[in-house]
């Protein structure tokens, strides 16, 4: 296991290097620059001074090596649009908001989706199955920003139970988390139902019933555990998307999270912010894939990792 994890993390480091090199090259290959998008073009001497200040006049390979060296020391530079703060300071203020929404979304969507999918499979072809399947289909079809607007109209404007947006109080989490969690919960419920139905008719499940095991024990130890295997493959990589935020959800509920930086940094050609965000996403994706492989062995001991001790 340890040798396998070491190999995977080494591969992750190589992938991060390749990804950052590609993104760094693409950023500088796009015509224009971060200071050429102003309404009033800067004089040539002013542009040269800015490029010297930020090192943009140096060769691209040298700029990249300097960025790597600084990143290894925890310095991701100063954002061009907000030079009074560092990139690390901006992200440290915005990411906790996104992490809070994302963490609650993961818990609610996965736990709720697995429970709804399992109930739907157990009550196959009943009115409960029809209601839950309709809910899952609707949840997948509706974009999260549409769900957000509907929640605001009903619970904030019409009923007045919850705030329309903002951040700072516990109730500010409720509507964004519900809107954000509906789609992954519906997706999780659909896959859980399909996987559970395949397992329900398996020989070892029928053998368990023949031995006189209770239905709850069969559903928990046999059906649910086996149904989790395809869910790990499909839903595990979705965790980085939830932990880095949704642009639409954060804009709908006026959350000061990380999601807005993904668009503003690109539109403003904010190179330091783009590189830091790309690195965060790459690390999250690679880590989640490694954890998914490990989770396979926890759900099904018959699965062994390549290079793990036998």
Image: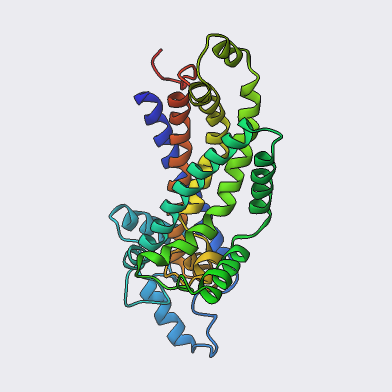
Residue displayed at 56% across by 49% down: 184
The quadrant holding residue 301 is: top left
Q: Position of residue 26 (x, y in %)?
A: 56, 60
The relative height of residue 28 versus residue 242 in the rendered view (above or below) is below
Answer with left or right where residue 239 lies relative to residue 149. left
**In this orientation, does residue 172 appear?**
yes
Quarter of the image with the N terminus is top left
Q: How many marks?
A: 0
Q: Position of residue 237 (x, y in %)?
A: 52, 43
**Can the viewer see residue 14 in this picture?**
no
- 33 vs 218, nearest the viewer: 218
Nearer the observer, 6 or 96: 96
Residue 173 position, x and y percent, is 42, 63
**Farthest residue, direction left:** 73
Q: Quadrant of residue 256?
A: bottom left
From the viewer's side, name the closer residue of 280 and 135. Answer: 135
Report the coloring of the rendering.
Answer: rainbow
Q: Is residue 198 left or right of residue 243?
A: right
Residue 251 drawn at (x, y percent): 52, 71
Please tell me which residue is depicted at 41% across the width and 67% down the height of the picture.
172
The residue drawn where x is 61% and y is 30% is 122
- Quadrant of the rendering where the C terminus is positioned: top left
Q: Nearer the viewer, residue 248 or 269?
A: 248
Q: Residue at x 44, y 80 (%)?
A: 48
């Amino acid at each position: 296991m340890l040798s396998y994890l070491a190999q995977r993390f080494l591969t992750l480091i190589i992938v991060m290097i390749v990804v950052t090199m590609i993104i760094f090259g693409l950023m500088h290959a796009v015509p224009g620059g971060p200071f050429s998008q102003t309404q009033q073009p800067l004089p040539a001497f002013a542009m040269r001074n800015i490029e010297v200040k930020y090192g943009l006049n140096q060769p691209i390979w040298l700029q990249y090596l300097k960025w790597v060296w600084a990143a290894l020391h925890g310095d991701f530079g100063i954002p061009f649009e907000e030079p009074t703060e560092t990139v690390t300071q901006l992200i440290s203020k915005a990411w906790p908001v996104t992490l809070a929404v994302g963490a609650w979304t993961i818990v609610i969507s996965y736990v709720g989706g697995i429970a709804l999918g399992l109930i739907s499979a157990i009550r196959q072809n009943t009115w409960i199955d029809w209601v839950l399947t309709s809910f899952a289909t609707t949840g997948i079809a509706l974009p999260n920003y549409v769900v957000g607007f509907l929640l605001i109209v009903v619970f904030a404007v019409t009923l007045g139970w919850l705030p329309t947006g903002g951040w700072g109080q516990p109730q500010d989490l409720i509507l964004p988390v519900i809107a954000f969690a509906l789609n992954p919960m519906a997706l999780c419920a659909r896959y859980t139902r399909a996987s559970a139905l395949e397992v329900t008719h398996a020989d070892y499940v029928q053998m368990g019933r023949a031995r006189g095991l209770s239905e709850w024990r069969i559903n928990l130890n046999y059906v649910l555990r086996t149904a989790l295997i395809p869910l790990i493959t499909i839903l595990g990589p979705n965790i980085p998307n939830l932990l880095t935020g949704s642009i639409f959800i954060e804009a709908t509920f006026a959350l000061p999270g990380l999601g807005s930086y993904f668009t503003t940094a690109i539109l403003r050609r904010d190179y330091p912010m783009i590189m830091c965000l790309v690195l965060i996403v790459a690390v999250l994706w690679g880590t989640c894939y490694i954890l998914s492989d490990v989770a396979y062995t926890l759900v099904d001991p018959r699965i062994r990792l390549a290079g793990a001790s036998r």
